[in-house]
Amino acid sequence: MESKRQLKYSKLIQKELGEIFQRESRSLIGNAMVTVTRVHMSPDLSVAKVYLSFLNANNQALFDKINEAKKSIRGDLGRRIGKSVRITPEIAFFLDESAAYAQHMDGVISSLQIPEPDDEDENEQ
């Protein structure tokens, strides 16, 4: 369970990183849409685990590109939140597969062959 302080920092970092990916990282991400799905802070607020989801992109290739640019992204984040925090946390990026998993499950469910109920079954109820 995260403390109120951790949650506050998580929300701040999620918001600011979202804006960084939307406005300042076009050269890095191109036309892809990057969503910061969630952020978990370590208890001492020194590490932020950042979960990313992508639209219109090769997930692994873009994730690798973002990971390589982690230092400059952290620098951008530091300039944005420097007045609110003592130290800019280290950033660890993770690929959030929940949207892809949900899409997969949606496909599985829609492809199920569910037989129509018999008239006899309806009469028994």
Image (tube, rainbow, N blue to C red):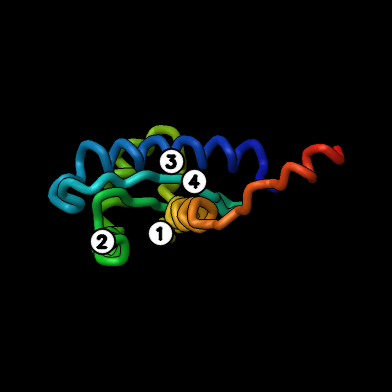
**Residue 113 shown left or right of residue 24 in the figure:** right
Residue picked out by circle 1: 93
Which amino acid, by three-letter code, is at mark 2?
A: Asn
Mark closer to the observer (2, 4): 2
Indicate which disc residue 58 carries: 2
* Residue 109 in sight from this viewpoint: yes
**Residue 17 shown left or right of residue 58 in the figure:** right
- The crowding category of the residue bearing disc 3, from other C-alpha atoms within 10 Å (few below 14, some 14 to 19, many at least 20), is many
Camera-nearest residue between 93 and 58:
58
For image coordinates 79% across by 45% down, the residue present is: 121
For image coordinates 57% across by 54% down, the residue present is: 42
Q: Position of residue 112 (x, y in %)?
A: 55, 57
Q: Is residue 60 above or below residue 3?
A: below
Report if the CB atoms under discs 1 and 2 are less than 8 Å apart: no
For image coordinates 86% across by 40% down, the residue present is: 124
Residue picked out by circle 3: 14
**SS assignment at label 4:** strand
Spatial CA span between label 4 and label 3 = 7 Å
